[in-house]
Amino acid sequence: MSQTIKKEKVRIESVNDLVVKFANVNGTGSASANNLFAKAVFRMGLSVSPKNIFPSNIQGLPTWYEVRVNDKGYLGRRDGVDIMVSVNPQSMAQDIQEVSSGGYFIYDNTRPLDIRLARNDISLIGLPLTQICLDEYKDPRQRQLFKNVIYVGALAALIDIEFDVLTSLVADQFQGKEKLIVPNVHALELGFQYVKENYSCPLPVRIERRDNLGEKLLIDGNTACGLGAIYGGATVAGWYPITPSTSVIEAFEKYCKRLRIDPGSGKKKYAIVQAEDELAAIGMVIGASWNGARAFTATSGPGISLMSEFLGLAYFAEIPTVLIDVQRSGPSTGMPTRTQQSDVLACAYASHGDTKHVLVFPSTPKECFEMTAQAFDLAEQLQTPVIMLTDLDLGMNDTMSDPFQWDDDREYKRGKVLSSDDLENMSERFGRYLDVDDDGITYRTYPGTHPTKGSFFTRGTSRDEYAVYTEDGSKYAENMDRLLKKWETGKHYVPAPEIIIAGDGSKIGIIHFGTSMDPTLEAIDYLADEGTVVDSCRIKAFPFNQEVEDFVAQHDTVFVIEQNRDAQMRALLVNECDIDPKHLKKILNFDGMPITARFIQAKVNSYIKNDNVTPLRRKHGQKGMS
Amino acid sequence: MSYLKPDFRHPDLPINDLGYTKKNYEGTISTLCAGCGHDSISGAIVQAIFELSIPPHSVAKMSGIGCSSKTPSYFLGDSHGFNSVHGRMPSVATGANMANREMIYIGVSGDGDTASIGMGQFTHAVRRNLNMMYIVENNGCYGLTKGQDSATSDVGSASKKGEPNPFEPIDLASVALQLGATFVARSFSGDKKQLIPLIKAAISHQGFAFIDIISPCVTFNNTAKSTKGYEYIREHLAATGTVDFVPMKEEITTSYSAGHSQEVTMHDGSVVHLHKADDRLDIHSSRSALGLIKDYRAQDKVLTGLLYLDPDSQELHESIGTTSRPLRALSENDLCPGSRTLKTINDSFR
């Protein structure tokens, strides 16, 4: 066997800047092994951003796990694969092609590699995974499962992951199932030792401990949303399973079981109802919110389509409704396991008739947590649906995040709700839709509050200020105008944008939102390296605050970065802020994979070159980024 | 219809245990057609709730869309009501009930709202045994869109349009029984004597109490060829027997002849007396009810009355184990785990 890596090859050399991709078969237990790898890198103090690229299938199809590692704090996806771990013969031809020139291809060489697949410009690293497992394990399931752990051990030796970090992770992972620790550590050792004995380790591509992550967490956005719902006081969840939102409710339930059981009776301080469809899920949320509980649901694009009628009811009847939309690639069933930001318009104007809904756009797990909790306040203060738009990338991938915080003095903002005493002391007639405070927000009562006062009939039909049915056009129009006034009030309630001014009066701005944040900020760094100074504005909510409009006005050219085909955020900006469409340039990625910094950088440069956009140039080496 | 509702009520109107008269249980004036069966049902609901001495504000009235779904405006004016979207009342009622288990939920739907657009949600509310009374005001047609056949219309039945309906009807009582509903009854809007005790029993029932009420549409489906018209129904009615409802706190005074009568104690201690007209009916057997419905139907008879009752019914809150305190009454202290717990949670993600 000649398994030494030929030295004459040009090989990628780097420390703490690499992309490792695992090519697996789904349903074979690779996910937890791959997780172990990512977490080990994380525990060595390096920025890590794993992306699960999985099929809409349970067993037998190709699935990939792509991990970017760096020590600059960049979390967006990076093109190019430095190391491919190939464990799936089905996709091997494609996987070997994907390796960057000079990269490394780790494969199971129990059988020789098909000569037709071989490439001269990459290093092949054979690892007899099947053979090792056949020798070590009798049980076929064990052979399959430990194969994954073995390649993690091998990779540890190849790129210099500290073995102790792996063993402590295994110990954490199998807390309470201690007898699994020894065999897992053994499997790690099998891979580690094999590579140590057969190759010169580490590879020129490797990592070094940095310990510069401070208090950072590694958590997926959906879990963060579930926790946000716990902290935000949600008690009722109606939901229907749909990828990639399902784990929001699963996380909510997991923490409810831990944190929301009444100690005296053992009974639940929450109700989770798996609905018959998305229509029923949102109906339950509306019913519970109407009756004074904090309720929410989570769904994805197809669910938004189904919920639209109910969202119109909640808008018009003014019922707080919290909805988390974990976006995936549409339209229709689209690419159900790929990411996109393509529900912006569907959510902004969901339902027939004149409707607009409050949207919030988290970019990090910490914001998923905070904005979910805040969504309940917003929905109750504004008595309207609040839709949080996250996506598959943030929702389902472990993402580095600042730690979550909660102020114990914080009080839930339940909005304008009249109590029994308020009603008792009221001399005038209660008007559910009477704009007493001139801010468009009227007072509501929970059912059953007072024996004789405050009852009203909630309806999706037109009514007067006293909730009495009317077909009087002027009353209808007055009410619709008041809803617009409420919308204006809402601009002061929703989260403000995050604006970064590079400091030199640049006339180029970038607008971005959600998961486009990390790649956008990274691209701005690259542009700065080239001497192009760009300001940025991260939109966190709709309705757009004045600051967003000002940002657009202050820049001659504004790029809007989006992960959809039709530039939906741009359309919303043009429509709502009365902006000349020419002012806003589209930068769009919609292939289902997260947008990258290099893509954004290239697009901006292409506009600069072709569209006579004159950037503010800075002398080389003079960086002004905050 | 009338446009004004007189304020005057007889000064000596009877009062209930709460000191309320029936006026306290009325709603706004009905805008339905004069003679509409639905108005009789509203009247029966008022009478039943008045007699049960239920405070109006402890009731939530839920409905979907259609003539039937307008009616919650016309009874219990001091109750909150929710006229939701077409066919989706069950989900809204489910959410409302989850938020506050202490209230009484009355759902009013129609045959279009339940047997067509709302069939899915109806079946799942039954399946979950949601604690509510669910009434279908069944007239075999779409009233508010002017008389199209509905899914409960019998084969050959013809509405005002004259075209006989070519399709088999969906029998909602049978559907409910097959789905495992824990209380199933059928009645006729014109039979208050039967309807009022059925409504009382349905309200006392812990779980999903379904009443399919034939309620003729005087405008579009009261023709000689209609099987949901007043004349046809009156001629083809057959009752399972008479039903007496005795609330928990009242003493049972009437006695019934043995063999024909069955006594069912409800969850709250109230008692339903069923004086059977047909000995084949076993009120605790859904199979018996399903069989009888078919038998009577084969003889062109519409079987009404109490059809099935499960006295051990376990409603949704019991099934999922929610706390006895209504969820909406829980405060931040009950719900928010606080910053210290959050620190521990943070640690678990490092």
Image (cartoon, rainbow, N blue to C red):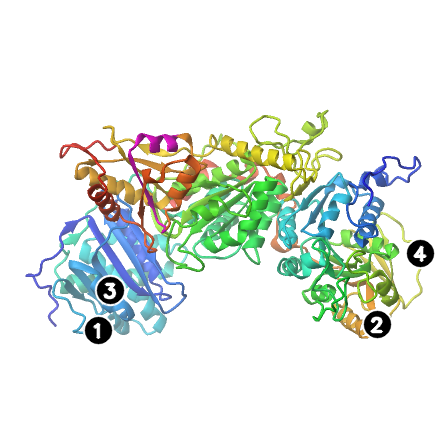
Kindly check if marks 2 and 1 are in contact, taking CB atoms under 8 A apart as contact: no
Task: Respond whether the residues carrying marks 3 and 4 are from the same subunit.
Answer: no
Please say whether residue B73 is one of the residues in the magenta stretch: no
Q: Are marks 2 and 4 in contact (CB under 8 Å)?
A: no
| 2 or 4: tag closer to the N-terminus | 4
Which residue, given by chain and number where applicable, does mark 2 sit on? B280
Q: Helix, strand, or loop for circle 3?
A: helix
Q: Which mark is residue B254?
A: 4
List the residue tagged with mark 1. A110
How much space separates mark 1 and mark 4, taking CA atoms? 88 Å
Q: Which residue, given by chain and number where applicable, does mark 3 sit on?
A: A95
Between marks 3 and 4 in the image, the one whose residue lies nearer the viewer: 3
Q: Looking at the picture, how far across and down is residue B96, in whole percent? A: 64, 46
What SS does tag 2 mark?
loop
The kind of residue tagged 2 is Arg
Q: Residues within 10 Å of mark 3 (few under 14, many from 20)?
A: many
Specify start and end residues of the magenta stretch as a single range.
A547-565
Q: Is residue B292 above or below residue B242?
A: below
- Whole-angstrom CA distance, mark 2 to mark 3, is 72 Å
| Front tag of 2 and 3 | 3
Element on which disc 1 rests: loop
Q: CA distance from mark 2 to mark 1?
A: 74 Å
State which chain disc 3 sits on: A
